[in-house]
Amino acid sequence: MSAADGVEYTPAELDRDATFYVAGHRGLVGSAIWRKLEASGFDRLVGKPSAELDLKDRDAVFSYMGEIKPKYVVLAAAKVGGILANSTYPVDFLSDNMRIQVNVLDAALENDVERVLFLGSSCIYPKFAAQPIREDSLLTGHLEETNDSYAIAKIAGILQTQAVRRQYGLPWISAMPTNLYGPNDNFSPAGSHVLPALIRRYDEAARSGAGAVTNWGTGTPRREFLHADDMADACLHLLEHYDGPGQVNVGTGSDVTIREIAETIAHVVGFDGETHWDTSKPDGTPQKLLDVSKLADAGWTSKISLSEGLERTVAWYREHVDSIRV
């Protein structure tokens, strides 16, 4: 129960017969959440692909939300990308994500949605935050320059979720995942995050017989990786067991260097050539490890090891390489 911000609510098992809207249900996180909810007995899941519903179109979002009248909403839709995409298109990452969030959250409020889970990103935290990063590090320092526009949009989503709690007393919550990976990720050369980009790069090199692969930066930054199926499991757990105004970090509590993850991926795909590092390219944040004690206190810890998750993701990538997002 959370009384400090005016919300009186005791988390409990969600109604499996209620309408549950997953915004972004075709993406990496949204599709994993959809699979988890389906496996957990929810039989009124709803969602529309972006080709049929542009979440940046306010009128369309309000019309759809009024039509489906969901009891629960998970906002997993977002414009996402790696360092290159964020650095090249900061306006798009700020504007698109702000519009998606404001439209979905405002429409959810208009339709009295009981429980909303807003999903952000660990990039909301300061570039040089103390490690592991606690939730109260938010807004205590400067952001990483290469993705500050995306981070600001996600921070705005957290604050809007908190504002709804204060002003309207609805038990809406937010969660900040670490670096995610798994089925339905974006493996495009220009738009992907580091892990799917490495999988594609090393797999193509292994298939072509290339003698070397070149990666960005020094390989020394440390990153934490969580499989999307673990994230989905954590989302349902939070909806049924947690309530509070502050965002909750979701991760594994351990990290590896980019160099180490590259070596592991090379091994998994069977690449035995050389790896070069282009140190003229940016590294991004030196380390980004989340403090997940708040999540652990809520009763959840990750279950899928990095090695198992990588093997599963590489297998999925190879099976779907001709139809994945590029």
Image (spheres, grey):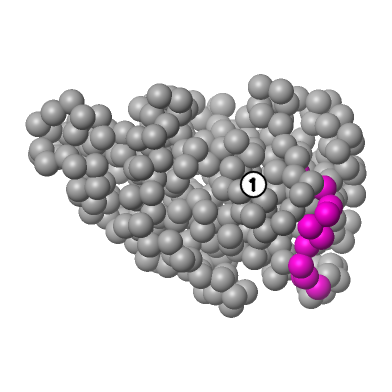
The spot of residue 44 in percent (x, y) is: 79, 46
Residue visible at 83% across and 70% down? Answer: 9
In this rendered view, identify the residue nearer to me: 326 or 292.
Answer: 326
Q: Is residue 186 above or below residue 220?
A: above
Query: Does 16 appear in magenta?
Result: yes
Q: State the image quarter where residue 41 is shown.
A: bottom right
Tell me the magenta residue range: 10-21
Q: Is residue 33 above or below residue 295?
A: above
Query: Does 193 appear in magenta?
Result: no
> Dot 1 surroundings within 10 Å: few (below 14), some, or many (20 or more)?
many
Q: Secondary structure at mark 1?
A: helix
Residue visible at 56% across and 26% down? Answer: 92
Whether residue 83 is visible here, answered yes or no, is no
Residue visible at 24% across and 42% down? Answer: 269
The residue lying furthest to the top in this view is 51
Name the residue that disc number 1 marks.
34
Residue visible at 78% across and 70% down? Answer: 12
Q: How many marks?
A: 1
The spot of residue 262 in percent (x, y) is: 24, 46
Q: State the image quarter where residue 254 is shown.
A: bottom left
Name the kind of residue labelled 1 in the image: Trp
In this rendered view, identify the residue nearer to me: 160 or 55.
Answer: 55
The spot of residue 17 in percent (x, y) is: 83, 54
Left or right of residue 79: residue 145: left
Whether residue 184 is visible here, answered yes or no, is yes
- Give the quarter of the figure containing the N terminus: bottom right
In this rendered view, identify the residue nearer to me: 11 or 107.
Answer: 11
